[in-house]
Amino acid sequence: MPSPNYTRCRCLPAAPRVRRASAFTLIELLVVIAIIVVVISIVLPALAGARDVARKTATQQLITNITNAATVFSQDEGRSPGYFTPTEMGDRANGNTRGMTAMQNAMLDLAGGIAADPNDGDAILVGPAPTEAGQVPVRVDTIGIDTNESGAYFVPDTKYYQPQTDAGKMGTAADEHRELPSVVDAWGTPMLLWVKNDAVDGSRFDVPNAAAASGVPFVRRDAGVVSLGRYEPAAFYVAANQSLLSATSLGVKGRDHADTSGSTFSLIGSGVSDTAREQTLTALLGHPAYPDDLAKSDAQQVAPTNARGSFVVQSAGSDGWYLSAKRAGSFYTGSEGNAQITYASMFFGPGGTDRYENNETRDIMQAFDDLVGTAGN
């Protein structure tokens, strides 16, 4: 039987099927973009909040380190730190032109830097008075360096110890005080220091513009011309921080503390009247637990009998304003140049006649994001 005749077929392999890549439709692309925007809107505030919390923690630790150093110094020396006395720092010239701050003064004792040789060519003369008799030579490059066996009481981290060289950073200040570093908080704003005048210990205090003044003003703009013996006593002087309170571009955030227009301004900035600032500072620095007489016929005449501390460190907080009017709430009375908070507002409601419910005391610092630390009595 004849064999079948098979024909071999040389077939080529089938071409692979090419799948066409699918593309996003316009709707899908818009949905993805919308999701990304939502995620960013959630994550960014959370990250900003976390950074703010970290800065607050760092600033609180810095304040604690300074107040602890001040406590140790006071125990050793029997006085608050500061090469110049609170009265000298309150000199009218310091408030008007010199512009040395209380914190800069305290650092001379806590961190050092005073030149051993008064003729040191690398030193700058600093001080609240306009004459060399009221100044001291300082070597900026030696601040914080241990110069004796006991070492410095406080060694500032360079990121928290910065000169304020631009004119707007310190409103009324001589060049040497712009060059002398200031302690800044974690937001980059110089911190204030309020040092009680021990010369008035045991005195009875009055609020600003007291109707029947019988004691020493708790806060005064300045101490007069101290170098000429024209000394006007007070527990605290605004002049010791006037250069920062009159800054037109304070700190990294550039806050104008000389301007009171708008709803956001400083209640202790130079744009507010002297009397209003003194009232607010009396509320800030007066201890809320020690009013003199809450039964006075005029509640606005209630004055503190003691300070929050003899050494009070104040950070402007995250908003960069020293006691922002925007945060003052019901404590705040007046407007713009006459805006103020009274010491009595911690005990009496709006109108200043009726006590708060259950006779409670409301510390004004609860309204602000300023951070405050104290040392001493």
Image: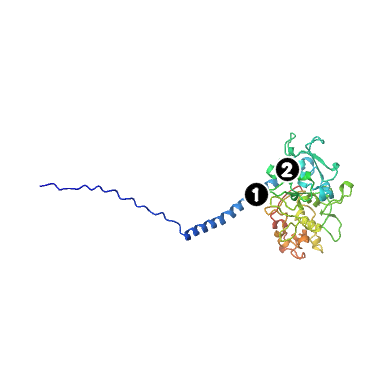
Single out the mark in the foreground, 2 or 1: 1
The relative height of residue 366 versus residue 94 in the rendered view (above or below) is: below
Amino acid on which disc 1 is placed: Arg
Nearer-N-terminus badge (2/1): 1
Q: Is residue 80 visible?
A: no
* Rendered view: 335 above or below 245: below
Q: Is the residue under label 1 in contact with that under label 2 (CB below 8 Å)?
A: no
Question: Would you identify the image quadrant in which residue 158 lies?
Answer: top right
Q: Position of residue 91 (x, y in %)?
A: 84, 49
Residue 112, quarter of the rendered image: top right
The residue carrying mark 2 is 69
Q: Horizontal and vertical percent for residue 359?
A: 73, 62
Give the SS element for disc 2. Answer: helix
Q: Can residue 177 be seen?
A: yes
Nearer to us in this view, 99 or 89: 99
C-alpha span from label 2 to label 1: 21 Å
- Between 15 and 158, the one lying in front of the other is 15
